[in-house]
Structure formats: C-alpha cells, structure tokens
Image (tube, rainbow, N blue to C red):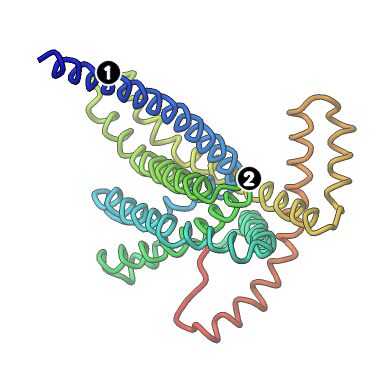
C-alpha cells in the first residue's frame, strides 16, 4: 500500500512539473505571440500609411457608382463591391505579391514605379477635368439601362477599378514591410487587406447614407435643432465629397511622386531624391513635420508635372491601342 501511495505521489509530482512546464511554455508563447502581433500591426500601420493616397482615392471614387440608383440598393451594392475587394486582395493579390517578392524581387521597384505613374496620371487627370469640366454620363446611362442592368454595369466597373487600386495598395504595402519573415509578410498584407477594405467601404457606406439620414432627421426630428441638423447634413454632403476628392487627389500626387523619387533612388539615380532631401533639411531644420511637409509638397509637384506629361501619352497612344485589342471595353476614370 505504501508503495502504491509513493507511486501516486511521484505521478502527482510529475503532473505538477508538467503543468509548470506547460504554463511556462504558454507564457512564453503568449509573449512571443504578442511581440509578433505588435510587429505585424506596426508594419501594417506603416505600410498602410504609404498607401494613403490610394485609400483616400478609393473612398472618394466609390460613391459615384451608386449615383442614380435606388436608395434601398446602395448598401447591397457597396457590400457586393467590398466582398469582391476582399477576394481580390486576399485570394489573388496577396499570394501574387508574395510570389513576386520570392521569385522576382527585382521587379517590385519597377512595378511600384509603374503604379506611381498611374497615381500621378489619375491625380493630374482629375485636376485637368476640374479645370476643363465635362458633363457626367450617369444621367444618360441611367436613361439607357434599366435598374438591374445599370446596377450590374456599375458593380462590374467598380470591381475593375477596385482591383487596380487594390493591386497598387498591396504593391506599396509589400515594399514598405520591414521584415524578412515570409509568414510575417503574409500576416501584414492580410491585416492591411482586411483593415483597408473594411475602412474604405465602411466610410463609403456612411457617406452614401449620410444624406438619407439627414433627410430623415429633418422630417421626423422632434426639436428644431435636430431638424436643422438634418437639413445641414444634406446641404453639407456635396461640400464633404468635394473635400474628400480634393484630399484624395493631393494624396495621390504626393504618394505617386514619392514612389517615383524613391524608386529612382533605389535604382541608383539620386536626382531628384537628393535635391528634395537637401531643400527639406535647409527649410525645415530639425522640425520633423516641416521637413515632411516640404518633402511631400515637392513630391506632389513632381507628381503633378509627371501626371500632366502622361495625360497625352495615355489618351492618345495607350488608350487607342488598348481599344484595338479590347474594342468592347471603355476606359473609365
């Protein structure tokens, strides 16, 4: 009997020791997990900031795809586009970005610069259209198509635009990730893909329903203050959309110019990277924000110049050639 008790005591001691070891392992795993998680989130935040211009433009562009459609269909349409955006980023673009970084890492910078040229072109074209406005085609489009076909056409156009912007976001993010771990790269890109898509389409949903909410408040508000608030929300929406579009255009030119400048520097061409750096240092001194502001302004100016130079090349050369091979498709901006 005493031998059995001794055996049980030994077993209990082993169990206690094992439990202690498991607890230590769990504690260490939690610490490592927290560190990895913090690293992933930090890298995701830095990389996401680099894609700011594309993100803001995405939020500014998407609401136009529900213009002229029934209010009851606005949120379902946005969800369709958001769902496709999640799929594009997580299933297609994330693996493609990782494979590109593994097998063709030298191609990342040229592709990034190509995307930068696209941003500069888009930003410059928006400014050109503001200076030389032309009537929007949404009203005519709504007259020519019934509601179902119009919605289908709009959703397809939005998904194509989103794919281009998503590709740019993932490429910019990949270049900005500061880790050599493929697992961490994948996690960071996944966090960016989910976070940015949720942010963009959450903001878009709020924007497209804000005027409806304001109209409702103006009708059912119990106090004059609430009714006035609703009317002011409706009045402010065009101004808000203009502000967002302006910020998005400026951000596109800044980010696009910054990508081109840093891309040339990475390829061994120090102009205009070094002059911009020296000007920012001489103007800003030790003031970090002022240096960033000068750098961003100069990057944006260069982005605008490049974009204006690209407009005739794209409209008179690339688009006609594209139309020959794909006559059924029309470039939309």
Q: Residue at x 44, y 39 (%)?
A: 237
Between discs 2 and 1, the one toward the N terminus = 1
Q: Mark 1 packing: few (<14 Cα in 10 Å), some, or many (20+)?
A: few
- How far across and down, in percent of the image, does residue 22 sit? 34, 27
Q: Residue at x 19, y 20 (%)?
A: 7
Q: Outermost residue toward the left?
A: 1
Q: Residue at x 52, y 57 (%)?
A: 165
Compared to 282, does 190 lie above or below?
Answer: below
Tag 2 residue: 251
Secondary structure at badge 1 equals: helix
In three-dimensional space, the C-alpha distance between marks 2 and 1, rounded to whole angstroms, equals: 64 Å
Left or right of residue 25, residue 285 in this image: right
| Cβ atoms under marks 2 and 1 closer than 8 Å | no
Using the image as rendered, state which of residue 329 and residue 147 is in the foreground: 329
Secondary structure at badge 2 equals: helix
Q: Residue at x 41, y 45 (%)?
A: 194
Compared to 232, does 51 lie above or below?
Answer: below
Q: Nearer the viewer, mark 2 or mark 1?
A: 1
- How far across and down, in percent of the image, does residue 137 sit? 45, 65
Tag 1 residue: 13
State the image quarter where residue 12 is shown.
top left
- How far across and down, in percent of the image, does residue 211 sit? 35, 39
Q: Outermost residue toward the top?
A: 2
In the picture, which quadrant includes the N terminus?
top left
- How far across and down, in percent of the image, does residue 271 sit? 87, 54
Question: Residue 268, can we see it?
Answer: yes
Using the image as rendered, state which of residue 273 and residue 79 is in the foreground: 273
> Which label is found at residue 72?
none
Compared to 205, does 83 lie above or below?
Answer: below
Question: Residue 125, can we see it?
Answer: no
Left or right of residue 40, residue 217 in this image: left
């Amino acid at each position: 009997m005493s031998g059995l008790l001794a055996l049980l005591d030994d077993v209990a001691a082993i169990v206690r020791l094992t439990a202690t070891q498991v607890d230590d392992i769990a504690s260490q795993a939690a610490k490592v997990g927290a560190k990895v998680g913090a690293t992933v989130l930090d890298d995701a935040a830095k990389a996401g900031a680099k894609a700011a211009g594309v993100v803001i433009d995405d939020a500014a562009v998407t609401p136009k795809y529900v213009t002229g459609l029934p209010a009851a269909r606005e949120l379902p349409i946005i969800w369709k586009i958001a769902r496709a955006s999640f799929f594009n980023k997580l299933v297609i673009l994330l693996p493609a970005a990782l494979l590109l970084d593994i097998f063709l890492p030298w191609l990342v910078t040229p592709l990034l610069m190509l995307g930068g040229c696209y941003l500069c072109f888009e930003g410059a074209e928006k400014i050109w259209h503001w200076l030389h406005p032309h009537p929007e085609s949404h009203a005519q489009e709504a007259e020519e198509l019934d509601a179902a076909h119009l919605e289908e056409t709009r959703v397809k156009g939005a998904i194509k635009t989103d794919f281009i912007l998503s590709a740019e976001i993932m490429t910019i993010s990949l270049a900005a990730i500061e880790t050599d771990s493929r697992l961490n790269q994948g996690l960071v890109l996944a966090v960016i893909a989910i976070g940015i898509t949720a942010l963009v389409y959450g903001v878009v949903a709020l924007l497209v329903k804000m005027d409806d909410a304001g109209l409702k408040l103006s009708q059912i508000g119990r106090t004059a203050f609430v009714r006035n608030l609703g009317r002011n929300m409706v009045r402010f929406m065009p101004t808000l959309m203009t502000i967002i579009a302006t910020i998005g255009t400026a951000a596109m030119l800044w980010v696009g110019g910054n990508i081109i400048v840093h891309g040339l520097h990475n390829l061994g061409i120090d102009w205009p990277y070094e002059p911009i750096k020296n000007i920012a240092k001489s103007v800003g001194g030790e003031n970090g924000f002022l240096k960033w502001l000068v750098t961003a302004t100069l990057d944006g100016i260069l982005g605008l110049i490049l974009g204006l130079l690209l407009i005739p090349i794209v409209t008179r050369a690339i688009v006609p050639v594209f139309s020959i091979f794909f006559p059924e498709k029309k470039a939309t901006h």
